Image (spheres, coloured by chain):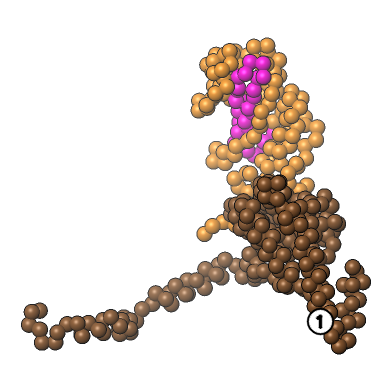
Chain colours: A brown, B orange
Amino acid sequence: MGIVLDRLPGIFEPIPGGSVLITSIDAIVNWARSNSLWPLAFGTKCCAIEMLMATGAPHQDLARFGAEVARQTPRQADLMVIAGAIVKKMALRMRLLYDQMAEPRYVMATGSCAISGGPFMYYSYSIVRGADEIVPVDVYVPGCPPRPEAFFYGLMTLQKMIRQGETIRKPGIRRKPVLAALPQGITMDDLRVEQREWLQRDNTVDMAKAAAQKTWAARLEQWVPKNSNNL
Amino acid sequence: MGSKIGTMGTEELEQLVITLEPRCRKRQSADRAAVIAPVAELDSLMRKLRDEHLLSFDLLLDHTAIDHIQEGRFELVYLLYSTRHGHHLMVTCDVDRANPVVPTVSEVWPIAHWQEREVFDLFGIGYDGHLDLRRVFLEDDWKGYPLRKDYTDPDMLEPA
């Protein structure tokens, strides 16, 4: 597999018709990867009950998606499901687990806590506000906790991302999702100031202009008879 | 409450404890039998509570603390249960906020090893005689005690 992925693009690309072949290889590789996402047995809070235990059980049957083989070691796992809040003490360990996983590795953040800190957003001294502060996250599954159906939707989204968004020409490049955390350098205060400016701009009204813009008012003249004596 | 299904009523239980240790007082607002013990008598009281035949509190259900920052004191709370008699008792103990040191009860109930480490971790109460008083949940190099009311942290967000 290593030879296929590392050498083939360089060999085939210059040959006429080679890029078609690479595209076919892409399809096969991505099909295989997306249908054998082995999750890491890693649960930090109550979402783990829903995500890894309920979905892995026969009623929900995670095996339909080829993702039932929960691995106890990060070296054999492809998918890290961050199920629950990450505390500061856990953050280093989680980063270590992520670094130990083999490429390509995928991360799903399930539940409010893993997305943004959730109910622990304020006044918490230990919760990391969003797992994407520590590792790059591919798919976010909202909920508190999400239902298994939501988890499956997230898993299918990830499979779709793998099938469509990757190529062996550029290993490691994939479509990034929208980040939940604020971008670097922007604080809530900046957003508030900007929002206040919008609100002030929207609520500053030129009365004459506003009155002129009322099309219904212009039509009033048509409705009221000009030489009516009844008024 | 559990004190009702036991052989002893709440009043009777409190009275017996105060007879054993006269410097204890009844705690007014509580949903079960509750006494306030001075720090100096805490160790001897706890040993008596465990060993006295009529009481035999053999289980320390929970140990925690309350930070009364306005009054400058910590209130330590010990929840006791007797598996023999089926009655509960709450023992509270006021300790000075500036220098919070109390005798350990880990020699009376070994489970208190962990519970006292937790209270030390989050409130910074010192336990005199504890064998291994280290942080248990937070990292070893953590600064401050997060459940104190005056604790501040740069990462603590506050809603505007």
| Quadrant of the image occupied by residue B107 | top right
**Point 70% across, 67% down: residue:** A160
Q: Position of residue A187 (x, y in %)?
A: 60, 67
Asked whether B56 or A167 is in front, the reply is A167
Badge 1 marks a residue whose secondary structure is helix
Q: Is residue A150 above or below residue A28?
A: above
Quarter the N terminus of chain A occupies: bottom right
The residue type indicated by label 1 comes to Val
Q: Is residue B156 visible?
A: no
Left or right of residue A193, residue A127 in this image: right
Subunit that carries the residue with mark 1: A
Q: Which residues are magenta?
A: B72-101
Quarter the C terminus of chain A occupies: bottom left
Left or right of residue B32, residue A155 in this image: right
| Quadrant of the image occupied by residue A99 | bottom right
Task: Report which residue position mark 1 lands on.
Answer: A20
Q: Is residue A98 above or below residue B26?
A: below
Q: Position of residue A115 (x, y in %)?
A: 64, 59
Q: Main secondary structure of the magenta part?
A: strand
Q: Position of residue A75 (x, y in %)?
A: 86, 57
**Point 47% across, 71% down: residue:** A196
**Point 71% across, 34% down: residue:** B115
| Quadrant of the image occupied by residue A7 | bottom right
Q: Is residue B114 visible?
A: yes
